[in-house]
Image (cartoon, coloured by chain):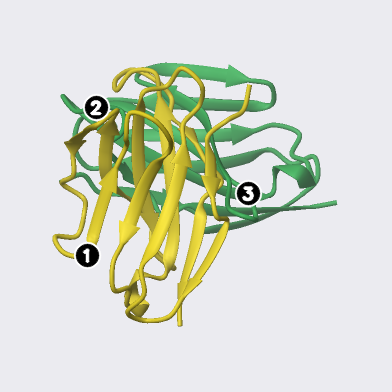
């Protein structure tokens, strides 16, 4: 069974700061998903990656398969980035739906 | 191009009543997944359905919970004889294929059992 741990649990930043959220998992995976959950509950899939690095706007996701670790970075953070960020591991040989989710990181960006 | 639609957004039920949660996948998506988010816990997979078929229900509680995805109409997650412990946010997601794809999530249904 895969264990997915995120850190920190809560993160408060000032607008413009560089943000890093970390995710580690215990067993081999085929892919790692990063999700964003806004107040009010809706979930948006940000990235799905199995190696290296992906970038979308101010968001960057990296993964190190050997170290079983992934990071989500936000450059030039903005109050609208305030949300819960969730990482989820897709187990090796599994399908994209049977994910093991972390408990999330609550990010608050103050103006 | 509407996304994944869930309704209702909020559902209040008394203990013992039935709860029905609906999910319409994105256009062109035939794979639907249900997840539950209990207070202070991470999301947990419940069930995966394709049209008229349950593919994987390994995350569903053995009793009182059922799901369907009929040929016509939305997918339904049904909880019979609800108890306080069923209070949670229930999310539905869809995809065109079951592997190597991002999932598209709905806004969730917050179920409160009084």
Mark 1 crowdedness (10 Å alpha carbons): few <14, some 14-19, many ≥20: few
Q: Position of residue A52 (x, y in %)?
A: 42, 16
Q: Nearer the viewer, residue A59 or A16?
A: A59
Give the secondary structure at mark 3: loop
Contact (Cβ within 8 Å) of mark 2 with mark 3:
no
Q: Which residue is mark 1?
A: B64
Contact (Cβ within 8 Å) of mark 1 with mark 3:
no
The quarter of the image holding the C terminus of chain B is bottom left
Q: Colour of chain A?
A: green
Q: Residue furthest right?
A: A111
Mark 3 crowdedness (10 Å alpha carbons): few <14, some 14-19, many ≥20: some
In the figure, is residue B98 to the left or right of A14?
left
Q: Colour of chain B?
A: yellow
Query: Which chain's residue wears label 3?
Result: A
**Residue B94 to residue B60: above or below:** above
**In front: label 1 or label 3:** 1
Res A27 seen here: yes
Query: Which chain's residue wears label 2?
Result: A
Q: Which residue is mark 3?
A: A38
Q: Position of residue A106 (x, y in %)?
A: 58, 55
Image quarter of residue B41: bottom left
Q: Which mark is residue A87?
A: none
Q: Which residue is mark 2?
A: A95
Q: Position of residue B29 (x, y in %)?
A: 42, 21
Q: Position of residue A53 (x, y in %)?
A: 48, 18
User: Which mark is first along the chain, 3 or 2?
Assistant: 3
Please determine if labels 1 and 2 lie on a single subunit: no
Give the secondary structure at mark 2: loop
């Amino acid at each position: 069974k895969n264990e997915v741990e995120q850190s920190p649990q809560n993160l408060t930043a000032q607008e413009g700061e560089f943000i890093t959220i970390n995710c580690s998992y215990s067993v081999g995976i085929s892919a790692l998903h990063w999700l964003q959950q806004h107040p009010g509950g809706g979930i948006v899939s940000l990235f799905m990656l199995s190696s290296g690095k992906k970038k979308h706007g101010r968001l960057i996701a990296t993964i190190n398969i050997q170290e079983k670790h992934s990071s989500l970075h936000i450059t030039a953070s903005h109050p609208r980035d305030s949300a819960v960020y969730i990482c989820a591991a897709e187990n090796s040989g599994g399908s994209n739906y049977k994910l093991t989710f972390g408990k999330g990181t609550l990010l608050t960006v103050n103006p | 191009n509407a996304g994944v639609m869930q309704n209702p957004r909020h559902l209040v039920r008394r203990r013992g009543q039935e709860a029905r949660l609906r999910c319409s996948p994105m256009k062109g998506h035939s794979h639907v997944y249900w997840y539950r988010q209990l207070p202070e816990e991470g999301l947990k997979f419940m069930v995966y359905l394709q049209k008229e078929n349950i593919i994987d229900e390994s995350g569903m509680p053995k009793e009182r919970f059922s799901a369907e995805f009929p040929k016509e109409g939305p997918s339904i997650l049904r909880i019979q004889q609800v108890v306080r412990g069923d209070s949670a946010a229930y999310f539905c997601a869809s995809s065109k294929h079951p592997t190597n794809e991002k999932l598209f999530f709905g806004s969730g249904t917050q179920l409160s059992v009084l």
